[in-house]
Image (tube, helix red, strand yellow):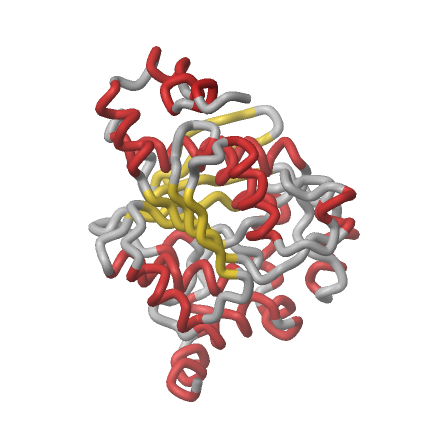
Amino acid sequence: MTEKEFEYKKLFERNYGIFQEKEQEKIKQGKVAIIGCGGAGGAITLALARSGVEEFILADPDTYEVTNINRQISCRANTLGENKATATKEDILKINPSAEVETYQDPQIEDIKNIIGKDPDVLVGVADDFPFAIIAMRKALENGISCVTSYPTGALVRVTTFLPEGPEPEEAFGIPKGLSYETLENIMFSTKYRKRFRNTLEFYKDEGEWTQEWFDKFIEQKYPLPQITPFVWLGSSLGALEVLKLLSDRWEPIASPKHWRIKANSAEIAEFDPPSLKEKIGSLALKLKEKL
């Protein structure tokens, strides 16, 4: 295609039937950090690229596996084994060669400070390593940066925006505030804690209509979260919409504790009151926090 055909206004011509020119310019100038480029993060990123966002920071240490094909937008036979942030960058540039994309292919906790220091307008926290995403969102909010998350679990997806003046990410998941990455990782991913909080986790199993067999294997850490493309991409589309709201100031975001809640036969915006782990963890979590 010619350079003229890739002119910004030509690429995103139809956007101007919705966004005023000054709003679309805010979208163009917006910088978005995506923590996790797999199912939710990859689809959010490419939806934003197709909406006119031109600057991205992508962070993901994982490479594509064959089990990712069922839901991850940049996972194809020819990208298996490729780093997810790198593959997503390649797809962004195929959409808009003028985009600027920085990648972190092995992000560490200390890299969060560097990412926040690049002053993104919005941070999207959707990593498979959700403790990492929580820490990133926590730090972003402390620096006045709004965050968006989408979390599909089975036949359910919830999407919300965290504003600096609003509830913290932990409050949306019933997790005690301020825990270290190591403690969060232990709580979320250890078999011991999954067994201890089995009754709490059943709330998500029931909401997401998991099969009982899958849930039992999940508790034993033999199976991951069940996910299918329609819910992952529905949540990603809504997540991208929330980012566009923040960049353009076109609409009010759906801010926590309000969430988009999409199920197989229903869709609503409602306040989410998750089952809390606080009382069940008690002083143990605080001791773990101090130790770690």
Residue closest to the far front:
2
Q: Residue at x 34, y 11 (%)?
A: 17
The residue closer to the viewer here, 23 or 190, is 23
Quadrant showing the C terminus: bottom left
Residue closest to the far bottom:
291
Q: Position of residue 290 (x, y in %)?
A: 38, 85
Q: Residue at x 54, y 66 (%)?
A: 106
Q: Position of residue 102 (x, y in %)?
A: 44, 53
User: Against 286, is 99 above or below?
Assistant: above
Q: Position of residue 64 (x, y in %)?
A: 69, 53
Q: Residue at x 54, y 58 (%)?
A: 60
Residue closest to the far top:
17
Q: Is residue 271 left or right of residue 108?
A: left
Residue 274 in view here: no
Please count the marks in the image. 0
Residue 208 in view here: yes
Q: Position of residue 248 (x, y in %)?
A: 27, 30
Quarter occupied by residue 133: bottom left
The residue closer to the viewer here, 47 or 213, is 47
Quarter occupied by residue 105: bottom right
Q: Residue at x 31, y 56 (%)?
A: 168
Quadrant showing the N terminus: top right
The residue closer to the viewer here, 259 or 73, is 73
Q: Is residue 175 left or right of residue 192?
A: left
The residue closer to the viewer here, 56 or 273, is 56
